[in-house]
């Protein structure tokens, strides 16, 4: 079934090449569009193998692979806005656990998924790898 372009929301980033990356997650926005198959339960998988943020103590870069899986509710996240949002963490100083949970919280707030799984696999620092897994709904959040 062909989509009706007039029904598309106005995107601030999609189709534009002159927009700079936002300097922080607070200044970034996650754009959304209507779920094309409401009422059907299906997974969307997004993979960002080159994520980076900063250690809040040393200021050194933390790199990670961030994988996002979600079952959309009424809305889906637009991927170019997700790319810009994730890139906005490059100069953000925060612990890995906080970063992963903030990304999940912002995605939940933006598109209200029925389910969300986020895995952030951070590269080893000091010989130890760190992986953060966030699920929504989680225990105690309802099914």
Image: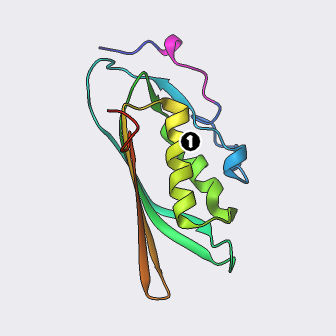
Q: Is residue 68 positioned above or below 78 on the image?
A: below
Whether residue 80 is visible here, answered yes or no, is: no
Q: Picture coordinates of residue 98 (x, y %)? A: 57, 59
Q: Picture coordinates of residue 99 (x, y %)? A: 56, 58
Q: Is residue 131 positioned above or below 102 on the image?
A: below
Q: Picture coordinates of residue 109 (x, y %)? A: 55, 34
Rendered-image quadrant of the C terminus:
top left
Residue hosting label 1: 106
Q: Secondary structure at mark 1?
A: helix
- The answer to whether residue 78 is left or right of residue 117 is right
- What's the residue at 52%, 53% (across, down)? 101
Magenta stretch, residue numbers: 5-11
Identify which residue, 117 or 16, lies in the foreground: 117
The total number of labels drawn is 1
- What's the residue at 26%, 31% (across, down)? 42
Rendered-image quadrant of the N terminus:
top left
């Amino acid at each position: 079934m062909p989509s009706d372009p007039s029904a598309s929301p106005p995107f601030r980033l999609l189709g534009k090449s002159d927009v700079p990356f936002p300097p922080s997650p607070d200044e970034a926005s996650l754009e959304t569009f209507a779920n094309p198959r409401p009422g059907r339960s299906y997974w969307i998988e997004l993979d960002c193998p080159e994520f980076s943020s900063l250690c809040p103590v040393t200021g050194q870069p933390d790199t990670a692979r961030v994988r996002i899986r979600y079952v959309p509710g009424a809305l889906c996240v637009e991927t170019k806005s997700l790319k810009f949002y994730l890139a906005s963490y490059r100069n953000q100083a925060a612990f890995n656990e906080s970063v992963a949970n903030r990304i999940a919280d912002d995605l939940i707030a933006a598109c209200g998924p029925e389910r969300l799984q986020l895995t952030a696999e951070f590269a080893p620092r000091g010989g130890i790898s760190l992986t953060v897994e966030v699920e929504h709904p989680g225990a105690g959040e309802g099914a």
